Amino acid sequence: MSSCCSGESCAIARTRASGEKACPRCGEVGRVVGDETIQTILKPGHAEGLLAVERRFCKTAGCSVLYYGADGRVVEKEAASVRVGVKETDDPAPLCYCFGFSRADVRRQVAERGDSDIPARITAEVRAGRCSCEVTNPSGTCCLGDVNEAVAEAVKALSR
């Protein structure tokens, strides 16, 4: 028996049914980002159109959209002034924009030690008040979720 909602078009409809705006390209609902993030991350001239509307970060790895507005406007990944780690397949793929850690740093440390202290190091810096994730991270959020995910992936890859 097949499900009517197993296809991509139904997945897009479900995300939009929540009332939140979905990425017009991939259909996933992104996180709202602030003006300061947009102005910091985008190259000059790319932010103005999005500042007047609610805008969201598209985290989907294979989607070329970086930000999209509630009115359907999109800004492509190429408009970013930094590499967007979740959208990169090649190194360097940044994970922590405040302290400069990359996916390669995590993999290297896990390969050498079997684990990584990068999340703990970032946590210590955050507790000391030395982070600015809301501005420097293209997603406008703390990087620790992505960093911990990268550590788990690296540990899993090591055990194969």
Image (cartoon, helix red, strand yellow):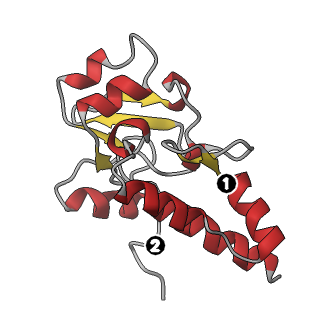
Report whether 24 appears left or right of 72: right
Image location (x, y in percent) of residue 136: 42, 37
Report whether 111 appears left or right of 43: right
Q: Which residue of the protein is positioned furthest toward the front in this rendering?
A: 128
Looking at the picture, tell me which residue is in the foreground, 34 or 124: 124
Upstream in sequence: badge 2 or badge 1: 2
Report whether 134 appears left or right of 34: right
Image quadrant in which you'd find residue 100: top right
Q: CA distance from mark 2 to mark 1?
A: 32 Å
Q: Residues within 10 Å of mark 2 (few under 14, many from 20)?
A: few
- Dot 2 amino acid type: Ser
Looking at the picture, tell me which residue is in the foreground, 59 or 121: 121
Q: Which mark is residue 103?
A: 1
- Dot 1 amino acid type: Arg
Image location (x, y in percent) of residue 22: 31, 49
Looking at the picture, tell me which residue is in the foreground, 139 or 126: 126
Question: Is label 2 in a helix, a strand or a loop?
Answer: loop
Question: Is label 1 in a helix, a strand or a loop?
Answer: helix
Frontmost of labels 2 and 1 is: 1
Q: Quadrant of the C terminus?
A: bottom right
Q: Which mark is residue 153?
A: none
Mark 2 vs 1: CB contact within 8 A:
no
**Relative vertical location of residue 157 with respect to residue 20 in this rendering, above or below:** below
Name the residue: 39% across, 74% down.
4
Report whether 29 appears left or right of 18: right
Q: Residues within 10 Å of mark 1 (few under 14, many from 20)?
A: many
| Residue bearing the label numbered 2 | 6
Name the residue: 61% across, 64% down.
150
Name the residue: 56% across, 68% down.
149
How many labels, in total?
A: 2
Name the residue: 53% across, 44% down.
63
**Relative vertical location of residue 15 with respect to residue 75 in this rendering, above or below:** below
